[in-house]
Amino acid sequence: MEPAEVMYQRLIEPIEEKMIGIVGRIVRDPDEAADVFQDVLAEIWARLRRINRHPNPRGYILRICISRSYDALRRRAHRRRREKRLARQSLESIPAAPPNCPTEGLRAKIRDLIGLLPPQQGKAVLLRLLDETSYRDIARILGCSEASARVHFSRGKERLGRLLQRRGWAEGTGA
């Protein structure tokens, strides 16, 4: 029986470009496609003996590429739905001011302005200011590092302040 490394080279090298093309066309995002391709290679390595015994090993390998690529698309769609739901819940959780309160209109305007922020910044601002979510949890929800979560929050808060000032809604400007 041939060693696993030789078997791997014999099965992968002839179709590697085709594998990369399939993953890239399905996933479309180059960074995500590179991650998916690495997952595909890891799975092929784990199933190498089974693939080698398969009547059509190249077809089996290409099927793994296709399956893992569509799995990535489903995860991406699920993540986006979860983020939209979270953003919607956070927007709805901004407490309304009591009637005739001078800040009642400001709260509604802030809610609208948060919707104008880039998605990652808006979510970070909502999570941090309204839900007092930790940066670690924000990073997990946004799918980024904790440092990136801090940057998203900081930039989102800055941008929100500028938007408020431009519209004359900031404190002391007659909101």
Image (cartoon, rainbow, N blue to C red):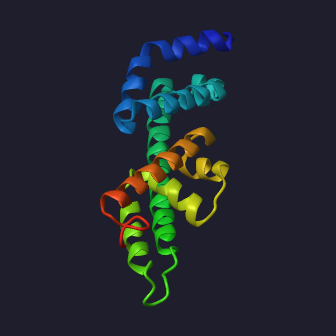
Residue at 44% from the left image edge and 13% from the top image edge: 14
Tell me where residue 133 sits by quadrant.
Answer: bottom right
Q: Can residue 48 be seen at all in this image of the molecule?
A: yes
Q: Quadrant of the N terminus?
A: top right
Using the image, determine if residue 61 lies above or below residue 167: above
Q: Quadrant of residue 20?
A: top left
Residue that protrudes farthest toward the front in the picture:
172
Q: Residue lying furthest bottom in this view?
A: 99
Image quadrant where residue 106 sits: bottom left
Q: Which of the two residues, 23 or 136, is positioned nearer the viewer here?
A: 136
Q: Would you say 101 lies left or right of 5 here?
A: left
Picture coordinates of residue 157 (x, y %)? 48, 53
Image quadrant where one finds the C terminus: bottom left
The image shows residue 117 at horizontal and vertical percentages of 38, 54
Which residue is pictured at 57% across the width and 52% down the height?
A: 141
Q: Position of residue 33 (x, y in %)?
A: 44, 32
Give me the residue at 41% from left, 51% from top.
Answer: 159
